[in-house]
Image (cartoon, helix red, strand yellow):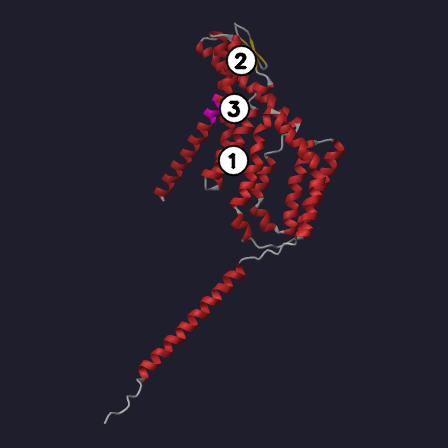
Amino acid sequence: MSQPISPNPVSGLREHALVTANQNLATSSEVDRHAVAGSTPRWSISWPPILFLGLLIVMLYHSIAVKLVNDWYELPDFSHCFLIPFFAAFLLWDKRRQIQSTPLVPSWSGVTLVILGLFMLFVGVLGADLFFQRTSFVILVAGLIWTLLGKEMLGQLKFVLFVLVLAIPLPTILFNQITFPLQLLASACASQLLPLVGVPVLRDGNVINLPAMALEVAEACSGIRSLMSLFTVAVIYGYFLERSNWRRVVLALSSLPIAVTANVARIFGTGLCVQYWDPDKALGFFHEFSGWLMFLVSLSCLYLVHLAMRLVAGEERQAA
């Protein structure tokens, strides 16, 4: 006669423990999902005020923006500025995840920058100062970001605002203060180098008197154009190829002596062509061609600086 088999109490306890553990695991994972979802800030955007604020900014800066773009087109020294709005837009797209994960903490502290930007715009319009009018836009946008989105968001976008500053031409007073010393520096350096290759030189300010003719280092030959263009390219280049901020700063600052040296080499080569070749061709074809050539050489020098910093960083890691 068969008897019923009683369930094993030990296996029952094991099954109960397994079920309880699975339930706890599911509960903890659900809590983790809620915690992660709660840590990501949710953006609730009210579009009507944003559109109204954007319309006010367009009304304030429409004519200023048109004049700015016109200066980019007409002034060769600032033709590189056409790249900057596209680079700024790319930065916003590239940092979209950091921007979306940044908590929104509006602050009244940003109103001070808003007032400063509006004051600069008012002074710039009354005084017909284009530099004040244009920089007021960057200050105003920074203040609005701080006020409406918070200081942490302003920190996320500070590099984008700095890039926008690069698109603003320097004021005439400051531009002249930089240009004339560069003319004197380039003419002085070229006057020191030309006698080394047998070309007698008599310098008078920014004019280099050669036996064949007088060579004037004009404002267009001061190197300010290549300096500003190369600095902007170095900032963009550093963002893409450098990962540490200090190396980006070093790369950008290295563009300044590179541009000055390249301009001295250009004037030196022009002097050689005037003396040993043909003055008309030296001031015509060679003068234009050497500008492009020296800019390519400057870009190569930037790349060498980038490689040198990579080698130094690699040696430091190996030493550590």
Q: Which amino acid type corresponds to the residue marked 1 in the rendered image?
A: Val
Q: Nearer the viewer, residue 87 or 7?
A: 7
Q: Is residue 297 magenta?
A: yes
**Residue 295 percent coordinates (x, y):** 49, 24
Q: Which amino acid type corresponds to the residue marked 3 in the rendered image?
A: Val
Horizontal side of 9 relative to 270 (left or right) equals left
At label 1, counting other C-alpha atoms closer than 10 Å, the crowd grade (few under 14, some 14-19, many 20 or more) is some
Residue at mark 1 = 235
Q: Nearer the viewer, residue 238 or 176?
A: 238
Q: CA distance from mark 1 to mark 3?
A: 17 Å
Residue at mark 3 = 260
| Callout in the foreground (2, 1) | 2
In the picture, the quarter occupied by the N terminus is bottom left
Magenta residues span 293-298
Residue at mark 2 = 284
Q: Which amino acid type corresponds to the residue marked 2 in the rendered image?
A: Gly
The numbered mark, 2 or 1, whose residue comes first in the sequence reads: 1
Q: Residue furthest left?
A: 1
